[in-house]
Amino acid sequence: MLVLVAALLLLGIALGAVAQLPVPVSLAAASVIGCWLLIFAVRERRTR
């Protein structure tokens, strides 16, 4: 749970920085964060 909170905090910081970054960099960062969260969700489902 702590990892999820940290991920959301980093996502919030990244969203604040998105206004300063070019669109391709923002999309790349969003895809990396999204993939990481997807992997986290799959691993959590498997443990149950």
Image: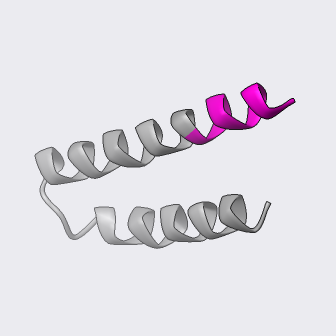
Q: Quadrant of the N terminus?
A: bottom right
The foreground one among 4 and 19 is 4
Give the image location of residue 33, x and y in percent.
Answer: 42, 48
The foreground one among 14 and 5 is 5
Residue 4 forms part of the magenta stretch: no
Apparent side of residue 47 relative to residue 18 in the rendered image (left or right): right
Apparent side of residue 24 relative to residue 13 in the rendered image (left or right): left
Q: Quadrant of the C terminus?
A: top right
Give the image location of residue 12, x and y in percent.
Answer: 53, 66
User: Looking at the image, which residue is at 22% across and 70% down?
Assistant: 20
User: Looking at the image, which residue is at 40% across and 66% down?
Assistant: 14
Residue 47 forms part of the magenta stretch: yes
User: Looking at the image, which residue is at 50% across and 69% down?
Assistant: 10
The foreground one among 48 and 1 is 48
Give the image location of residue 24, x and y in percent.
Answer: 12, 45
The foreground one among 39 and 7 is 39
- Range of magenta residues: 40-48
